[in-house]
Amino acid sequence: MLIFLRILLGVYTLAMNAYSFLLLKFQKDSYDEGECENAVHDGKLFIAALLGGALGIYVAMFALKYRRRSMFLMVLMPVIIVVNAYLLYRAFTGTYGLYPARYEYGAALFLSFLF
């Protein structure tokens, strides 16, 4: 069952990054065609990044050569990438700090406050 959840998490992460890449591509295409009212707004990009697609947005910015002067995306996306990578690492390894019996008593007490 745990392997199935890890596979599901991996597929979700890949799908979210592909969706984020396409979201930025659609935003670029709509601004190039002059359809600003139908464009994807930055709020959707931010939500997609928080849900695990920050790497897809960041890669799309450089692959499509679009929005690279936006400080909102250039500074915030790497920070969200680090947070996403940390949460993904914690999800795949299964170390949530909930099992203090694996550590010595003093270290478990210290680690339980950190995590």
Image: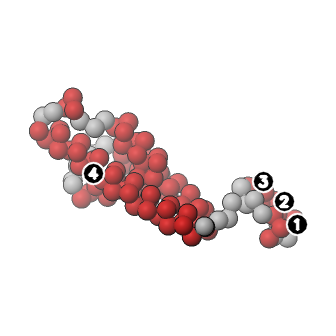
- Closer to the camera in the image, 80 or 22: 22
Amino acid type, mark 4: Leu
Q: Which residue is mark 1?
A: 105
The earlier-in-sequence mark between 2 and 4 is 4
Tag 2: amino acid: Leu
- Whole-angstrom CA distance, mark 3 to mark 4, is 40 Å
Name of the residue lying farthest toward the top = 37
**For the residues marked 1 and 2, what is the alpha-carbon distance in whole angstroms?**
6 Å
Residue at 30 percent across and 53 percent down: it is: 21
Q: Secondary structure at mark 1?
A: helix
Q: Residue furthest left?
A: 33
Residue 32 x, y percent position in the rendering: 13, 41
Labels 2 & 3 near each other (Cβ < 8 A): yes
Circle 1 packing at 10 Å, graded few (<14), some (14-19), many (20+), is: few
Q: Earlier in the sequence, mark 1 or mark 4?
A: 4
How far across and how far down the image is residue 28, in percent? Answer: 20, 44
Give the vertical position of 27 relative to 109 (above or below).
Answer: above
Q: Are marks 1 and 2 in contact (CB under 8 Å)?
A: yes
Image quadrant where residue 94 sits: bottom right
Element on which disc 3 rests: helix
- Check the image and tell me how it is coloured: secondary structure
Pointer 1 with pointer 4, Cβ within 8 A: no
Q: Image quadrant for the C terminus? A: bottom right
Residue for badge 3: 113
Q: Which residue is mark 4?
A: 22
